[in-house]
Image (tube, rainbow, N blue to C red):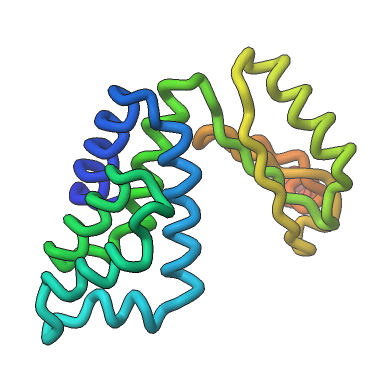
Amino acid sequence: MTEFAKMYGGSLYDLAAEERADSEILAQLDECVGLLRDNPDYLRLLSTPSLPKKERCGLLDEALRGEIHIYLLNFLKILCERGQLRQLAECARAYRLRYNAAHGILEATAVSAVALTSDQARRLQNKLETVTGKQIDLHCKVDPGVLGGIRLDIDGTELDGTVKNRLSGLRSSIAAVTL
């Protein structure tokens, strides 16, 4: 994450938290990131240096006024004016990190060979919340390479209970045995 994203995303969070609009702006920020990701031509247009800044900001204003919080709209305009709109996803990530820290939320990613059912994901999330004492924002991913079991990444700590990891450990143990 760039220093720019940390500074700008963090500043947006500080302002939103001060106004008690942090949850609302987080949801809208995620939508804006998705909108620009799904419409790369719009992002390219808003990043075109040959188009005057005033017109680019006007396009944002026209498309989003009344649809998103005014602080977020102004934030997008600032990024647009500075030619940094492509950094929005990283700014959103910085915002989310600050939001999670303030609200006692830990992000966790569960990687398994097959998709977890909603019941399995719910039970895993409940177990993690019990163990950590914090709210867990669980994301599930599928990687057939894990063969079986599950790998968890919780706030930067990896817990690997996959078959692939166990086989690797067994392989190391066998290789260490000398005849």
Vertical placement of residue 14 versus 150, above or below: above
**Residue drawn 31% across the image and 34% down it:** 13
**Residue drawn 48% across the image and 51% down it:** 30
Q: Could you say which is closer to the camera, residue 71 or residue 128?
A: 71
How many marks the image carries: the answer is 0
Residue 131 figure quarter:
top right
Vertical placement of residue 122 versus 128, above or below: below
Specify the farthest residue to the bottom: 50
Question: Looking at the image, can residue 179 be seen?
Answer: no
Question: Viewed as shown, does residue 107 lie left or right of 44?
Answer: right
**Residue drawn 25% across the image and 31% down it:** 15
Question: Looking at the image, can residue 75 be seen?
Answer: yes
Q: Could you say which is closer to the camera, residue 151 or residue 109?
A: 109
**Residue drawn 12% across the image and 70% down it:** 54
Vertical placement of residue 41 versus 83, above or below: below
Question: Viewed as shown, does residue 90 lie left or right of 169?
Answer: left
Query: Percent from the top left, x then y, of residue 41?
Result: 38, 83
Question: Viewed as shown, does residue 80 lie left or right of 153?
Answer: left
Q: Could you say which is closer to the camera, residue 136 or residue 157?
A: 136
Query: Percent from the top left, x then y, of residue 53?
Result: 12, 72
Query: Percent from the top left, x then y, of residue 164?
Result: 77, 53
Question: Viewed as shown, does residue 119 lie left or right of 1?
Answer: right
